[in-house]
Image: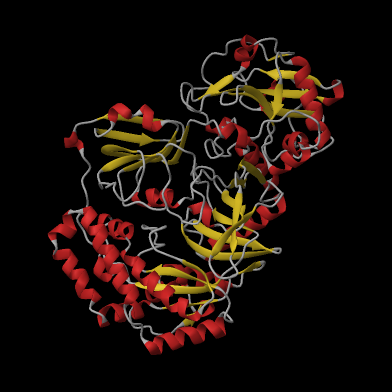
């Protein structure tokens, strides 16, 4: 009884794979807008034996989200393998699911396990799927539910049956890695999700609503000042931004970019809108209301009196300055974040859990207290107070940027405590065996549940020289006073005087490939149990952005695992031309791209999904996790886990 109920539930939910996450808009019967199935069908017929024209198709097709960028005309089909692959084009205005049509037309009787009969068994009587008009490529495609276990020959039989009875060419669109691999050598014409997404005109990266002054930025450099009350339009995606009221980018990007994580933390709308700089030219400098949802955006002029209020409470991030021990990751737990910073605390929790099939590279944490002592010894804490009383510093962003730069330079030049230096280098030689390390920020004002801090602070990469390790520690300390970091704390009302920088020194991994994954669908909160993965060849730095990355557009391979269908879907393929690898002298260098085009196969993807699920469970299953990973010689390395703000 329980098994039948579970299968029935799966049947109802089987098409709830993200509406907008894949950007290619897969038909999704349980997520259609209200009223789509309530209108009177254009014809009372149950099905058509062939589609001789677009008029025939429209007669039986239903359309979700009409007059939006996500409008998708589509119709179901059924093929009877016992009747010489006879095809029925189902009146999809009349029947919501294949099962409804099959039972209403007495092709199957009630009872039995219809779900397994049409989706799981290879030797099935009926092949079922959907045909859709893909506007962005001007082509019809047919597809199957991503969890459908049909064999390769049935994909080819479907291709032949459709193209004999349809008025124009219909291409196959794989909806999972399995379908992609099965169809690769069948000699059939295909359209991939990646091809469709390249021409997408809109993608909601964070759904929200805000009011601000529209600011179109042609080139973002140090001559451009960004106000906290602005909704900005960007032609390129920077590594970081000060807090704003909204973000619009004119080029596609990944939802795991630092900019999008910041937008989620600020709770502001963020979207890719093709040619937004041209579309909104007449609105530049005007106050507007900007709203994003899954299928469309809204933007309109408003009166400046409608500006959004700002909170006035200053909050101090939690800290414990009594801990002075340089501790290994396995000696640190999440509760120790108040002493070592959130990044070190969270990663220590993962390292200590000894989750099977992963490796957390060895490392150690330098607690917050040593930053505070260093700043006090050299009078830098007093300098911070002086800044806050300097009206030019407070009111002139350009002046503030310059003063913070000079401040960081002063920190870099200041003398380091010799006793602490000896302890750090001793730990480097014993804990990391003197290997190349990454010197990473771990402040008490990052990786928090309500403040990501993504991309605000510095990481010094692949350091091999002892002297450069100490310089790297000072670089990370100084990065607490990066302009973008200061602005982010200021606009999120975080007390600068109670913010401290810890440091994580960790063995570097010269990855074969790497990326970031989150334990949710970043586009669609209703797609329960999903895991999203962004991956590229070489080091994963370019997924979130970095100075070493090429300035040209870079889209990672993006995939989504659906728990409902137990399938892995390919959203976009990587467009990398080069990769980042370790330089023997330290740091990173560019290298040639491997011959393989696919970064992850089905096995690797599922292994990552399993690990992501275990890490979320480790942190109590209450908060989704944003997890940084690397893959080398068959081993998966976990480099970071932090709360994902959604």
Whether residue 24 is visible, yes or no, is: no
Q: How many marks?
A: 0
Q: Position of residue 422 (x, y in %)?
A: 45, 88
Q: Is residue 56 left or right of residue 412?
A: right
Q: Position of residue 455 (x, y in %)?
A: 41, 58
Quarter of the image where one finds residue 1 = top right
* Colouring scheme, one of rainbow, by chain, secondary structure, one colour: secondary structure
Q: Position of residue 222 (x, y in %)?
A: 31, 51
Quarter of the image where one finds residue 174 = top right
538 up-or-down from 41: above or below: below
Q: Nearer the viewer, residue 423 or 152?
A: 423
Quarter of the image where one finds residue 499 = bottom left
- The residue lying at 47 percent from left, 56 percent from top is 546
Q: Nearer the viewer, residue 410 or 575?
A: 410
Q: Nearer the viewer, residue 475 or 153?
A: 475
Q: Position of residue 64 (x, y in %)?
A: 52, 25
Whether residue 475 is visible, yes or no, is: yes
The extreme bottom residue here reads 419
- The residue lying at 71 percent from left, 19 percent from top is 169
Q: Is residue 356 left or right of residue 86?
A: left
- The residue lying at 74 percent from left, 18 percent from top is 88
605 up-or-down from 39: above or below: below
Q: Is residue 184 left or right of residue 380?
A: right
54 up-or-down from 388: above or below: above
415 up-or-down from 601: above or below: below
């Amino acid at each position: 009884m329980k098994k039948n109920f579970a299968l029935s539930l799966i049947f109802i939910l089987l098409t709830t794979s993200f509406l907008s996450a894949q950007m290619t808009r897969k038909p999704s019967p349980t997520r259609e807008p209200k009223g789509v199935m309530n209108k009177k069908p254009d014809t009372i017929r149950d099905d058509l034996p062939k589609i001789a024209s677009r008029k025939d198709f429209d007669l039986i097709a239903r359309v979700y989200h009409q007059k939006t960028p996500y409008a998708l005309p589509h119709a179901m089909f059924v093929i009877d393998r016992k009747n010489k692959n006879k095809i029925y084009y189902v009146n999809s205005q009349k029947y919501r699911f294949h099962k409804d049509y099959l039972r209403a037309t007495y092709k199957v009787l009630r009872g039995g396990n219809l779900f397994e009969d049409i989706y799981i068994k290879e030797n099935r009587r009926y092949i079922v799927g959907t045909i859709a008009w893909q506007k962005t490529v001007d082509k019809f495609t047919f597809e199957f539910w991503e969890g459908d276990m049909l064999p390769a020959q049935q994909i080819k039989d479907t291709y032949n049956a459709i193209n004999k009875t349809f008025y124009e060419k219909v291409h196959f669109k794989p909806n999972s890695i399995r379908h992609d691999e099965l169809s690769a050598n069948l000699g059939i014409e295909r359209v991939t999700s990646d091809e469709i997404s390249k021409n997408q005109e809109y993608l909601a990266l964070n759904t929200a609503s805000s009011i601000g002054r529209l600011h179109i930025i042609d080139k973002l450099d140090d001559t451009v000042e960004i106000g906290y009350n602005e909704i900005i339009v960007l032609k390129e995606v920077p590594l970081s931004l000060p807090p704003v009221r909204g973000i619009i980018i004119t080029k596609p990007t990944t939802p795991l970019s630092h900019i999008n994580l910041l937008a989620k933390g600020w709770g502001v709308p963020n979207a890719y809108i093709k040619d937004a700089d041209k579309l909104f030219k007449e609105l530049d400098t005007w106050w507007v209301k900007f709203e994003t949802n899954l299928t469309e955006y809204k933007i309109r002029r408003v009166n400046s009196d409608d500006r959004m209020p700002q909170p006035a409470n200053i909050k101090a991030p939690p800290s414990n300055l009594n801990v002075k021990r340089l501790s290994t990751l396995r000696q640190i737990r999440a509760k120790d974040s108040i002493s070592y910073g959130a990044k070190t605390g969270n990663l220590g929790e993962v390292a200590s859990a000894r989750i099977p099939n992963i490796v957390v590279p060895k490392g150690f944490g330098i607690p917050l207290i040593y930053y505070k002592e260093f700043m006090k010894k050299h009078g830098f804490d007093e300098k911070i107070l002086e800044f806050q009383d300097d009206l030019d510093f407070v009111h002139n962003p350009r002046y503030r940027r310059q003063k913070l730069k000079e401040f960081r330079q002063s920190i870099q030049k200041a003398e380091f405590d010799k006793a602490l230096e000896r302890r750090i280098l001793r730990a480097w030689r014993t804990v990391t065996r003197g290997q190349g390390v990454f010197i990473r920020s771990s402040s008490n004002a990052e990786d928090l549940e309500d403040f990501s801090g993504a991309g605000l602070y510095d990481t010094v990469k692949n350091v091999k020289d002892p002297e450069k390790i100490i310089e790297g520690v000072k670089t990370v300390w100084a990065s607490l006073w990066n302009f973008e970091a200061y602005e982010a704390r200021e606009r999120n009302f975080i007390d600068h005087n109670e913010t401290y920088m810890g440091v994580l020194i960790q063995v570097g991994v010269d990855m074969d490939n790497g990326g970031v994954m989150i334990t949710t669908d970043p586009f669609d909160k209703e797609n329960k149990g999903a895991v999203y993965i962004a991956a590229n060849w070489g080091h994963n730095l370019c997924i979130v952005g970095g100075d070493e990355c090429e300035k040209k557009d870079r889209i990672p391979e993006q995939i989504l695992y659906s728990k409902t269908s137990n399938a892995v879907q390919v959203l976009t393929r990587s467009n990398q031309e080069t990769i980042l690898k370790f330089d023997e002298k330290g740091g990173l260098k560019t290298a040639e791209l491997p011959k393989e085009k696919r970064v992850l196969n089905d096995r690797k993807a599922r292994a990552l999904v399993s690990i992501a699920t275990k890490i979320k469970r480790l942190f109590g299953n209450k908060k989704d996790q944003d997890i940084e990973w690397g893959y080398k010689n068959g081993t998966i390395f976990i480099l970071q886990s932090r709360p994902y703000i959604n």
